[in-house]
Amino acid sequence: MKKDEWHIVRFASRGNNSFIESAKAAVQDYFSPNNISVYANREMWIKTIVMLSLYFVPYTLMVVGLGAGNVWLYLGLWLLTGLGVTGIGASIMHDANHGSFSPKKGINDMIGHILEIIGGYAPTWKIQHNVLHHTYTNVTGLDEDIDSIKFLRFSPNQPRHWYHRYQHMYAWGFYMLMTLFWMTAKDYLQVLRYKSHGLLSKQKVTLKQAMFRISLFKVIYYGYILVLPLIFSGMPWYWVLAGFFLMHFTAGLLLACIFQPAHVMSSSGYATPDADRKMKDSWAVHEMENTTNYAPRSRVLSWCIGGLNYQIEHHLFSGICHVHYRKLAPIVKQQAAAFNIPYQVQPTFIRALWEHARMLKKLGRK
């Protein structure tokens, strides 16, 4: 198999009058007659301003010395920046890098590159998330959201070791390290791996360009996020580092808690391709069997986490801005029922986290 074909898995044909075609038609019937754009509306633009402010305002106040002499206020500002990282990641750059923020590619690209400002790198994110995760959800060896470090077993198709028996207790600690690892080493490791598999060129970037840009963005990121507070905040270096780690621990844990209950659940199918690399179901049915919504009645939670409690709608219609998912959910649920396809929902966020923890425990056992 050629290096640029390593990841190809063929899903079953969706057939005529399929679930996804019917769902697309029903969703279109919501937007077109009501003259509603599938892209960002005023609510989305307001949220963008709020989430950016949640990150940059506390940071600015901290750098100019607002928290100097008051450790709790100072750490509180860092905590708010962690919430800002979460909001930017889940609510702003996520839509933009899916192309669902605006019908104009230039606007999507500009907003999507906010990821570089908070320490990441958009091309590698797009490969991991848009290409691999959204296409091969929960397929071991292809979906890097479940192919994590060896201490975490997210699929029954992965090797099990003795320490996985305790992963439902220690996984949360690794979740806290997620963004810190991402902003430090993950992008470098990914770009080398994606180059070897022929995926990097699809983002129209060479390895040399990617390595240079990643390095440049990391220098800028660590320059403003650590060096400026060390110089101007008026706080000792150890409190600056404590705040920096607090920000990342907060963002890492929250982002993991947002995404993990959507897929690593006991209700997930975890289907694998056969010897000919073919799946038994169509792509849309596979997504339905490996995705779970949660807390559909909580409009506050949905607003805060970029509508990602509606993961089913997001996976089926990632080109639609998340502010519309709440209205699309009943439509998709009705279509799923008509085709006798599971539509998996946990009633609350807490319940979803509990079920995710139970799944971690289950995966740690024989």
Image (cartoon, helix red, strand yellow):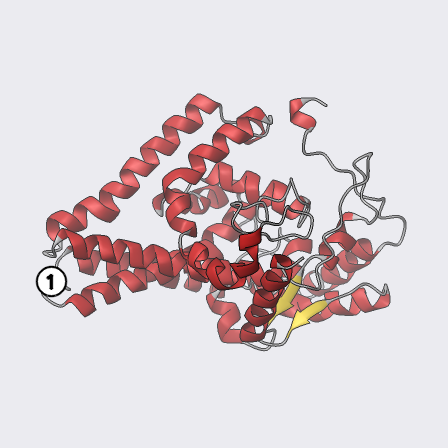
Toward which corner of the image does residue 218 lie, by quadrant? top left
Residue 328 spot, x, y in % from top left: 67, 66
- Dividing the picture into quarters, in which one does residue 183 lie? top left
Nearer to the camera, 117 or 9? 9
Question: Which residue is drawn at the image coordinates 40% and 52% (left, top)?
Answer: 177
Above or below residue 295? Residue 268 is above
4 above or below 28? above
Work out whether 108 lies above or below 234. Answer: above
Label 1 amino acid? Ala
Question: Residue sitting at 34 percent across and 31 percent down?
Answer: 215
* On-image quarter of the N terminus: top right
Residue 358 image point, x, y percent: 60, 67
Q: Position of residue 23 (x, y in %)?
A: 77, 59
- Residue 53 can be seen, yes or no: no
Q: Is residue 40 left or right of residue 335?
A: left
Q: Secondary structure at mark 1?
A: loop
Q: Is residue 101 above or below residue 339?
A: above
Q: In terms of depth relative to the viewer, which is nearer, 272 or 313?
A: 272
Q: Is residue 59 visible?
A: yes
Residue occupying the far right of the picture: 16
For the point 56% across and 55% down, the residue is 164
Mark 1: few/some/many CA within 10 Å (<14, 14-19, 20+)? some
In depth, the one of 192 and 60 nearer the eye is 192
Number of numbered discs visible in the structure rendering: 1
Q: Position of residue 49 (x, y in %)?
A: 37, 60
- Quadrant showing the C terminus: bottom right
Find disc 1 in the rendering and name its residue. 68
